[in-house]
């Protein structure tokens, strides 16, 4: 199979510091690939290598199976940076029109394209306001819109939702998912959120300290990941005791104050089945909390046993 992008033994050294350490990965065409990692893992550096902004210290990059030079790469791709490169003094529409012209679109085409993108990204209402007055979420949407002006084959999104509130984060997720589905574009995104990778990505690679420590489809990877924790609160001791009997067979821990902790791989299914079992016995849950594994939990799990590279695919 030919991949949209392939990195082979890719490394980047800054002085003595190996920011990217001989990584290998393959990005399938038309899919969403997520590079998941903590601050300083090497995500942005990897994007800079793949987009020709940095020269690798070692290793090779292939686009559609062909070894690509930095110059070739730069004409093919589009990058949305972690820190948006928008002109704050211009309106959203002006930003898109000017960037469109920088992509060699004729003025009229740039104007039309800007209008379409503003609509697609739900920025029509704000189109003629200065970007300095935009919220973080609006700026990020405009930034993604701008990166589509050149009709790229591959879209790179560096932490598209970091620092964005939950409602706007969901909006951005939907836009990214729609882009992949409708345009068939290959999307390479980085994130610090397991949830984001889980929702968006077809394939996930986990990076830590410059190395890839695990990778696989989200379904494969999830089996290797720590389970989510469900906390069920009961309003009285009687219900708490009864619930323990009803839920025999689950992975349960008893917590103080009439609370139970249950481990779940498929959290939604598990929640549904727990509630239905409890309801059958007329046990009332007074509160429920879902605790997702943190990225740290994931690292601990995938590197368990001293292995520095737990391939799970
Ligand atoms: N131009 C540079 N010169 C020297 N060191 C750098 C440079 N760019 C990045 N680094 C170092 O390389 C490592 C990886 O940085 P990188 O920006 O790729 O991480 P990241 O995964 O994108 O992190 P974040 O989530 O904080 O954006 C870090 O230790 C960083 O300090
Ligand atoms: Mg970064």
Image (tube, helix red, strand yellow):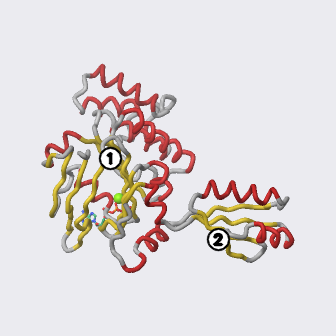
Which quadrant holds residue 261?
A: bottom right
Q: Residue at x 49, y 50 (%)?
A: 199
Res 40 visible: no
| In this view, 25 is above or below 238 | above
Label count reads 2
Spatial CA distance of label 2 from label 1 is 40 Å
Residue 60 percent coordinates (x, y): 16, 56
Q: Residue at x 23, y 45 (%)?
A: 2
Q: x and y percent of residue 99 in the render?
A: 29, 34
Query: In front here: 84 or 65?
Result: 65
**Ligand 2 visible in quadrant:** bottom left
Whole-percent x and y of residue 288?
71, 61
Image height of 38 relative to 125, above or below: below
Residue 72 sits in quarter: top left
Q: Is residue 255 left or right of residue 3?
A: right
The crowd level at tag 2 (other Cα within 10 Å; few <14, some 14-19, many 20+) is: few
Query: Which quarter of the rendering shows the C terminus?
Result: bottom left
Residue extending farthest to the front is 249
**In what element is the residue under mark 2?**
loop
Using the image, determine if residue 159 lies above or below residue 38: above
In the image, which disc is placed on residue 201?
none
Image height check: is 39 above or below 170?
below
Task: Pick whichever of labels 2 and 1 is earlier in the sequence.
Answer: 1
Q: Secondary structure at mark 1?
A: strand
Give the residue at x 64% y 71%: 251
Residue 130 lies in what quarter of the image?
A: top left
Q: Which mark is residue 251?
A: 2
The answer to whether the residue bearing label 2 lies less than 8 angstroms from the nearest atom of ligand 1 is no
**Can you identify the residue that label 1 sits on?**
156
Q: Locate residue 8, reporting x and y percent.
A: 20, 59
Closest to the observer, 249 or 18: 249
């Amino acid at each position: 199979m030919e991949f949209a992008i392939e990195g082979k033994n890719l490394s980047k050294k800054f002085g003595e510091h190996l920011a990217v350490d001989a990584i290998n990965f393959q990005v399938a065409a038309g899919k969403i690939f997520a590079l998941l990692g903590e601050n300083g893992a090497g995500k942005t550096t990897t994007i800079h290598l793949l987009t020709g902004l940095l020269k690798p210290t070692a290793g090779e990059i292939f686009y559609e199976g062909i070894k690509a030079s930095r110059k070739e790469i730069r004409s093919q791709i589009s990058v949305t940076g972690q820190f948006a490169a928008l002109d704050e003094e211009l309106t959203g529409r002006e930003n898109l029109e000017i960037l469109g012209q920088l992509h060699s679109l004729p003025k009229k085409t740039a104007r039309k394209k800007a209008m379409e993108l503003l609509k697609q990204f739900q920025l029509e209402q704000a189109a003629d306001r200065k970007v300095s007055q935009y919220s973080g979420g609006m700026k990020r949407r405009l930034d993604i819109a701008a990166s589509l002006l050149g009709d790229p084959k591959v879209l790179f999104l560096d932490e598209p939702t970091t620092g964005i509130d939950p409602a706007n984060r969901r909006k951005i997720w939907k836009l990214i998912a729609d882009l992949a589905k409708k345009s068939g574009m290959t999307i390479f995104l980085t994130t610090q959120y397991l949830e984001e990778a889980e929702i968006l990505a077809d394939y996930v690679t986990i990076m830590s300290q410059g190395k890839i420590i695990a990778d696989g489809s989200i379904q494969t990877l999830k089996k290797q990941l720590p389970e989510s924790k469900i906390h069920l609160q009961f309003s009285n001791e009687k219900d708490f005791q009864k619930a323990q009997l009803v839920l025999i067979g689950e992975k349960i821990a008893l917590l103080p104050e009439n609370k139970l902790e249950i481990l779940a791989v498929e959290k939604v299914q598990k929640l549904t089945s727990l509630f239905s079992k409890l309801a059958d016995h007329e046990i009332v849950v007074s509160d429920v909390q879902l605790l997702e594994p943190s990225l740290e939990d994931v690292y601990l799990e995938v590197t368990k046993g001293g292995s520095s590279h737990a391939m799970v695919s």
